[in-house]
Image (cartoon, grey):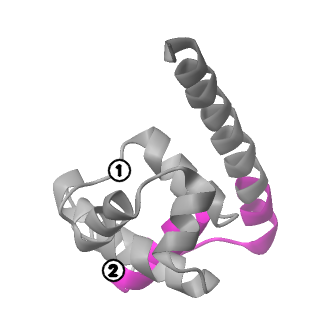
């Protein structure tokens, strides 16, 4: 089904996030414990994200993706796969999207880390 034909409300789209996160991690060959160590998130948090008990906030999602050297574009690709939607992207703009996504995620992670350092006792 084309993307235009399968419009979902945000809350409907969110139901696909847990499976996409799990598939993305499994695709890297990393276990939750490894991603936990790399991201600073607890294994319990990762498990709750992948089972759908909770959804990650932007900081946690950023840490999760960066721990696997992934970005929002990678997550979107897996979400499209889980939703059985054919993405309509060309390779050149997608490469630019990926690079931009990595830069944005790195900036967000830096802000989150600085905030954590500022809040630390």
Residue drawn at point x = 77 percent, y = 73 percent: 91
Q: Residue furthest front?
A: 121
Numbered range of the magenta stretch: 73-97
> Does 50 sit left or right of 109 as displayed?
left
Instruction: Examine the structure image and report whether residue 80 is included in the region drawn in magenta.
Output: yes
The front one of 90 and 108 is 108
Label 1 neighbourhood size at 10 Å, few (<14), some (14-19), many (20+)? some
The front one of 40 and 9 is 40
Q: Percent from the top left, x then y, of residue 31?
A: 52, 80
Name the element at disc 1: loop
Quarter of the image where one finds residue 84: bottom left
The front one of 15 and 83 is 15
Q: Percent from the top left, x then y, of residue 49?
A: 31, 63
Q: Is residue 17 above or below residue 98?
A: below
Front tag of 1 and 2: 1
The front one of 44 and 49 is 44
The kind of secondary structure the magenta stretch mainly shows is: helix
- Which residue, given by chain and number where applicable, does mark 1 sit on? 56
Instruction: Examine the structure image and report whether residue 94 is included in the region drawn in magenta.
Output: yes
Q: Is residue 42 visible?
A: yes
Residue drawn at point x = 24 percent, y = 73 percent: 51
Q: Percent from the top left, x then y, of residue 44?
A: 32, 62
> Does 21 sit left or right of 112 as displayed?
left
Q: Is residue 86 visible?
A: no
Mark count: 2
Q: Percent from the top left, x then y, of residue 38?
A: 63, 59
Question: Which quadrant is the N terminus positioned in?
Answer: bottom left
- Which residue, given by chain and number where applicable, does mark 2 sit on? 83
Q: Is residue 8 above or below residue 107?
A: below
């Amino acid at each position: 089904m084309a993307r235009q034909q399968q419009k979902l409300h945000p809350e409907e789209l969110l139901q696909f996030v847990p499976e996409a996160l799990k598939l993305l991690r499994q695709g890297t060959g990393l276990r939750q414990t490894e991603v936990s160590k790399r991201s600073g998130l607890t294994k319990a948090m990762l498990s709750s994200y992948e089972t759908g008990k909770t959804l990650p906030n932007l900081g946690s999602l950023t840490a999760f993706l960066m721990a696997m050297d992934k970005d929002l574009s990678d997550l979107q690709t897996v979400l499209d796969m889980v939703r059985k939607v054919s993405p309509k992207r060309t390779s050149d703009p997608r490469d630019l999207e990926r690079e931009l996504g990595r830069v944005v995620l790195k900036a967000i992670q830096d802000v989150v880390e600085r905030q954590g350092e500022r809040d630390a006792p």
